[in-house]
């Protein structure tokens, strides 16, 4: 009777061991299966991400090809004082602010009534008009300057801007930094291509430019990006 009991106990132990080993194998297989699924999912994400980047780059190339223009400009005169040109002085050279409902004129005397970002852009406009390319380039972040490529204007003459308007496009906050997208619209009389080479000399056309400003906790404002109207609203350059 005892031997029979011991024999059954040993058989039960062996059976339990086999069941335990089987469970371990099933568990290991399940783990490998889950790991395999995650690996395949990761690979799929990489493929989709790569395809998305490729598609985005193709769309950007196509847009830039569509926007690319080639104009013939007169030789730039870096000694020309545009404030001695009666034709330019006769233009509407005021800097307007459009709040979406009302337009007001920004002047040196009322500048303090406007938001710091608008004050910043008012000064930027005057840098462009004066041809102060050294100070103009200092408004941008180092990251922008390193990646600006053809959009960077290392030197330009005084620019005969007129019909100038500033308007908020977007504004939001991330942590302690406030971002403001401000659209600057203007025309250039006698454009020589040193500042804007996407506008013709004679047509006095306009292509608005959106400046992305970042304001840190100390109130320091810099331009972290700059895009023409079409590029900005394409959503391809975020």
Image (tube, rainbow, N blue to C red):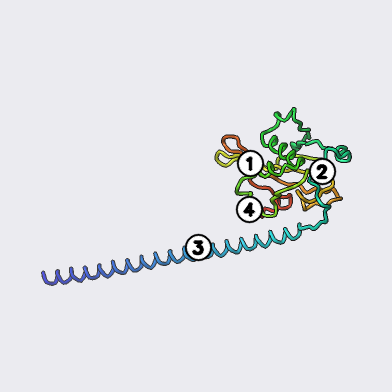
Q: Earlier in the sequence, mark 3 or mark 1?
A: 3
Secondary structure beneath dot 1 equals strand
Question: Farthest front residue?
Answer: 79
Mark 1, other Cα within 10 Å: few <14 / some 14–19 / many ≥20: many
Q: Could you say which quadrant of the image residue 141 lies in?
A: top right
Cα distance in 3D space between marks 2 and 4: 31 Å
Mark 3, other Cα within 10 Å: few <14 / some 14–19 / many ≥20: few
Quickly name the residue at label 3: 42
Q: Earlier in the sequence, mark 3 or mark 4?
A: 3
Does residue 18 appear left or right of residue 63 in this picture?
Answer: left
Cα distance in 3D space between marks 2 and 3: 60 Å
Image point (66%, 53%), residue name: 237
Q: Earlier in the sequence, mark 2 or mark 1?
A: 2
* Quadrant position of the N terminus in the picture: bottom left
Q: Earlier in the sequence, mark 2 or mark 3?
A: 3
Cα distance in 3D space between marks 4 and 1: 15 Å
Quickly name the residue at label 1: 222
């Amino acid at each position: 009777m005892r031997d029979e009991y011991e024999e059954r106990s040993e058989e039960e132990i062996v059976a339990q061991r086999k069941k335990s080993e089987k469970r371990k194998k099933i568990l290991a297989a399940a783990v490998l299966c889950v790991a395999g699924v995650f690996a395949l999912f990761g690979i799929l994400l990489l493929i989709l991400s790569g395809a998305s980047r490729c598609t985005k780059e193709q769309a950007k190339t196509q847009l830039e090809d569509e926007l690319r223009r080639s104009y013939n400009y007169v030789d730039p005169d870096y000694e020309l004082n545009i404030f001695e040109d009666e034709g330019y002085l006769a233009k509407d050279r005021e800097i307007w602010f459009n709040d979406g409902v009302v337009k007001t004129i920004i002047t040196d005397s009322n500048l303090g009534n406007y938001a710091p970002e608008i004050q910043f852009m008012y000064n930027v406009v005057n840098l462009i008009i004066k041809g102060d390319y050294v100070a103009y380039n200092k408004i941008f972040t180092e990251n922008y300057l390193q990646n600006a490529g053809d959009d960077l204007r290392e030197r330009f003459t005084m620019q005969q801007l007129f019909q100038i308007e500033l308007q908020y496009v977007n504004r939001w906050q991330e942590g302690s930094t406030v971002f403001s997208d401000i659209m600057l619209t203007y025309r250039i009389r006698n454009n020589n291509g040193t500042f804007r080479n996407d506008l013709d000399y004679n047509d006095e056309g306009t292509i608005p430019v959106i400046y992305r400003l970042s304001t840190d906790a100390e109130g320091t404002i810099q331009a972290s990006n700059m895009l023409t109207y079409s590029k900005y609203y394409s959503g391809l350059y975020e």
